[in-house]
Amino acid sequence: MDWDAGRVSAVGMESAQASDARQGASPAALQRRLLAFLRGFRVGPLFYYREQLLANARRSHWFVTVNLSHVAAFDQELQDLLLKSPKEQLPLLENAAKEMLTQLLVSSQDAGAPDSSTSGISSSNLPDIQAILTSDQAPVALRHVHSQEINRLVKVPGIVISATRVRTKCVSATLKCRNCGHTKRVAVAGMGGVSIPRICDRNREEDNGVTPGEMCPKDSYVVLPDQGHYVDQQTLKLQENPEVVPTGEMPRNLALVADRHLVDRASPGTRVSVVGITSVVNAGGKNVGA
């Protein structure tokens, strides 16, 4: 019997374009594309975002305001990614902005005649840069924000009807085991508090020489407050503009969470157009939109 008869062979037919697209979806590749946008986008002869980053740094304003129409003009796919998965793309944009500013400061210092307005800024310990997005797209009415917009970037108009005081929000906490002194850093996602592991990571190293008698007890981690990273945060309530509320219906509203350079930007009674990420959060055991 000929076992080779009728044999079926498979050959990888992935095109170079498909391979590039697959590799381009990695976070590192996306950050390089965002960096290329910040470095190369021009308005006339002006490198728009280079100049904006330097101008803000001179005033110790650690943010960059990015217009989504600029992103679309430079790379339509990047804009689509920002709209569809902003929670993943915004940190990459902020990392790219910090990298861009670092490069600008280093090149200025290496030139031998640094700009006097930036000579006091160290490129080695720059604070994080916040990316603030603006959009020229048509706004979505507040009552038309439905489940398909969850975790997407939307533009919503309305009136701010209340605002809390600015409070401190922990975004990264350092934990230390009371038994063995092991430390670890954990990110604090969303609007919740610090999630403290019940088991020390050292217990997971039993295969590396930790015997059961040396294992730490449960709930041994404590938070080190002086080694955490904190930002300003404020909660606002946005209500529909009265002229768009159908006759006989109550105006709808939602909660907004602003942080860092966006706090104290709008007081109650101010009409605004908000570009933000719609999400569902857990507050007091109930799911609410924000």
Image: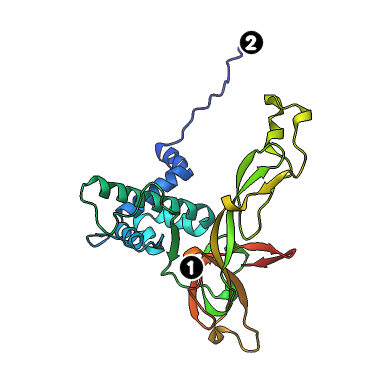
**Callouts 2 and 1 close, C-beta under 8 Å:** no
- Residue on which disc 2 sits: 1
Residue 199: x %, y % from top left:
73, 41
Q: Secondary structure at mark 1?
A: helix
Which residue: 57% across, 20% down? 7
**Which three-letter amino acid code belongs to the residue tagged 1?**
Leu
Which residue: 32% across, 52% down? 39
211 to the left or right of 45 = right
The relative height of residue 198 versus residue 62 in the rendered view (above or below) is above
**Which three-letter amino acid code belongs to the residue tagged 2?**
Met
Which residue: 70% across, 45% down? 221
In this view, the residue in front, 132 or 181, is: 181
**In the displayed image of the protein, which residue is found farthest to the bottom?**
247
Binning the other alpha carbons within 10 Å of mark 1 as few (below 14), some (14 to 19) or many (20 upward) gives: some
Q: Secondary structure at mark 2?
A: loop
Quadrant position of residue 268: bottom right
Inter-mark Cα distance, 2 to 1: 76 Å
Which residue: 65% across, 89% down? 248
In this view, the residue in front, 36 or 143, is: 36
Quadrant position of residue 38: bottom left
Residue 5: x %, y % from top left:
58, 17
- Residue on which disc 1 sits: 262
Q: Which quadrant is the C terminus positioned in? A: bottom right
Residue 208: x %, y % from top left:
67, 25
Q: Which quadrant is the N terminus positioned in? A: top right
Residue 25 visible within the image: no
94 to the left or right of 183 = left
Residue 167 visible within the image: yes
